[in-house]
Image (spheres, rainbow, N blue to C red):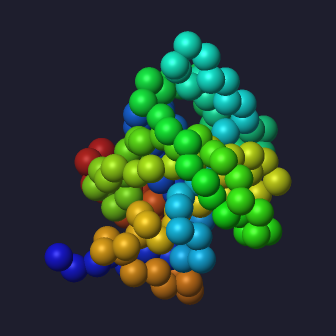
Amino acid sequence: MSKKIIGRIDKADFPTLDLFDINIKIDTGAYTSSMHCHKVIEKDNLLKCLFFDKEHPNYNKKIIVFKNYSTTKVKSSNGMVENRYMVKTSIILFDKKYKINLTLSTRSEMKNPILIGRKFLSKKFLVDINLKNLSFEQKIINNTKSIK
């Protein structure tokens, strides 16, 4: 299986979360992938997540409920280890749907609400830091072709 080249930043769709054209940062320094979540409430064995951020207008302000979730320890960029919720969902890149595990964190100060780490990238993608938005540009081209 050949690996697809992806740039340092892109936009991705998360159809099961009803989130589309969300800014992502490719981070080979991070092991896990992480998603900004404005508010997380665990109640009655359910995880309720609010995806809202005025800095990221494509976050839709909907509450997504996860029945299946777990917690994991994550070492953040500042070296601190923290417990985070982890959810399984899907991501669409280059018109292909992949399963992905995302830890939920507060990334409100970050330019990109989603960080894609090595665990997801491994065996699927090669990263070219000089490129950006390759998947998103392909999506636009394919959507333009389907309109014609």
Choose between 5 and 145: the one closer to the eye: 5
Residue beneath the point at 72% across and 35% down: 38
Image-based side of 89 in relation to 105, left or right: left
> Residue 11 versus residue 51: which sits nearer the camera?
51
59 left or right of 26 in image: right
Q: Compared with residue 137, is residue 103 higher up or lower down, i.e. above or below?
A: above
Q: Tell me which residue sits at (44%, 24%) in the image.
A: 67
Q: Name the spot of residue 15 as percent of width and height, x first.
A: 40, 37
Estimate the x, y position of residue 31 in percent, counting from the top left. 53, 68
Q: Is residue 146 left or right of residue 111?
A: left
When the figure is inspected, residue 30 is found, relative to residue 12, above or below; the finding is below
Residue 10 visible (yes or no)? no
Report if residue 85 is visible in the image: yes
The spot of residue 107 in percent (x, y) is 74, 51
Q: On screen, 142 above or below 119?
A: above
Quadrant location, the N terminus:
bottom left
Front one among 39 and 59: 39
Q: Name which residue lies at 53% across and 61% down.
A: 32
The structure residue drawn at horizontal position 67% and vertical position 64%, both measured from the top left corner, is: 75
Quarter of the view holding residue 28: bottom right
Number of marks: 0
Nearest the eye: 58 or 143: 58
In terms of image quadrants, where is residue 53?
top right
In the picture as drawn, the residue positioned furthest to the left comes out as 1
Residue 129 percent coordinates (x, y): 56, 84
Residue at the outermost top position: 44
